[in-house]
Amino acid sequence: MENQKNFHLIPADHAMKLEIIIKTYGLLEAEEYFMSISDSASKKAACLPLLRGYVRDRDTSKAETFMVKLYDLGLMVSPHPYNEMMKLYLATCEYSKVPLVIQQMKRNRVPCNVLSYNLWMNACGEGERYGVAAVERIFRVMQNDENIELGWSSLATLANVYIKAGQSDKAIQVLRYAEKKLSTCNPLGYFFLITLYASLKEKEGVLRLWEASKAVGGKISCANYISILTCMVKLGDIVQAKRIFREWESNCQKYDIRVSNVLLGAYVRNGLIQEAEALHVHTLERGGCPNYKTWEILIEGYVKNQKMDEAIIAMKRALALLKDCDWRPPQGLVLAIAEYLEKQGNFDYANEYATEVHNFGLANLPLYKILLRMHISANKPPFHILKMMDKDKVEMDDETLSILNAFTG
């Protein structure tokens, strides 16, 4: 586009290019590109993506320095950069800095928008110096701001502050008011409120809003089903969760295993391993493709119920997925299988298993101890184990040294 003689980039193009540079090359390249922009309007459009990059990286120092630069350039004329800084301070738990951002907005005569007020309330709800009374004062200021239309998001923010403060009655009252502000065209707000009702153990509110969300235009997404199922499981109503799951199954066009994983996890946590196994078989029949979380849940269930052969098979399938994702199985489950192999005296498979675990960078000292003990029992030299330990930079403790001494003795 830039090489076309008769083509002129507009400010939005520069902002989009800077976003692509951040994703492709990183922030250093993006900084250089930002500095090369000469047009003031284009610089103004591109400043927000760069600031968001600093916020995503939690780089407070660079973000604060950049804000000073934007002020010097005369680009601090909207609430958006200030909102980004407040998001950063919330993410880094620097709650006391958020009111300072609001003060800076006032000094620079930049009006707060809805997000500004919501972030301000969140910070005061978290910070020890402020509390509920401070949040209520901010909410009243917001109500009196003629440029702000009070919506469900601000009421949800206030309700969440009440929930964290243990003021359930006030939270429920605000949530009922928030329900009246929900859109009849967009289901987004419904699920924010559903989650808050669930945290209050208000099942009636959860189900009421769930049914109301279905009347809103648009398709109920898999993410929405995951949200409502998670809430029902949190409320301990597995029967209702099963009903909602069947409803999703009857309407889904593509089987999303993440939905069934919610119910699978509920079965395992409640000791219902047979139901979990039956659900797993059912999802396979429906064309579901197990992911790492599916196998982790099943391994946990099998280990809890001492179905260790099934746990080993599930762990094999889970490890096969590690090449394509960043997930790693919990160390407790990895060790539980190793301990079982030691108890069974399954020397050959224990070596195979430990090697595979080592190759994925999952081995640790307790696992190697198990393997060393098995080598001593089998009177087999543990040289390859010591090589793996050296490669993993695992330091031996006194117990490990005593195991080796027993071998050499």
Image (cartoon, grey):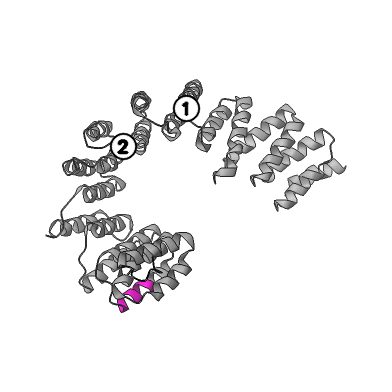
Q: Looking at the image, is 222 positioned above or below residue 42?
A: above
Q: CA distance from mark 2 to mark 1?
A: 31 Å
Q: Quarter holding the N terminus?
A: bottom left
Residue that carries the numbered disc 2 in the rendered image: 198
* Tag 1 secondary structure: loop
Q: Residue 243, how many percent across, how many down?
A: 34, 24
> Between residues 404 and 192, which one lies in front from this camera angle?
192
Q: Residue 43, how many percent across, how many down?
A: 33, 72
Residue that carries the numbered disc 1 in the rendered image: 287
Mark carried by residue 180: none
* Tag 2 secondary structure: helix
Task: List the single residue furthest toward the right.
Answer: 409
Sequence-first disc among 2 and 1: 2
Q: Quadrant of residue 199?
A: top left
Whether 68 is among the magenta residues is: yes
Q: Amino acid at mark 2?
A: Ala
> Between residues 76 and 153, which one lies in front from this camera angle?
76
Q: Looking at the image, is 224 positioned above or below residue 60?
A: above
Whether 52 is among the magenta residues is: no
Q: Residue 87, how many percent across, how many down?
A: 34, 59
Q: Residues within 10 Å of mark 2 (few under 14, many from 20)?
A: many
The structure residue drawn at horizontal position 28% and vertical position 47%, both measured from the top left corner, is 160
Q: Amino acid at mark 1?
A: Gly
Q: Residue 303, how many percent across, how many down?
A: 58, 29
The structure residue drawn at horizontal position 69% and vertical position 46%, both measured from the top left corner, is 365
Q: The magenta stretch spans which residues?
A: 65-73
Q: Quarter holding the C terminus?
A: top right
The structure residue drawn at horizontal position 60% and vertical position 33%, both measured from the top left corner, is 317
In the picture, measured across the screen, residue 38 lies left or right of residue 138, that is right
The structure residue drawn at horizontal position 64% and vertical position 25%, both measured from the top left corner, is 309
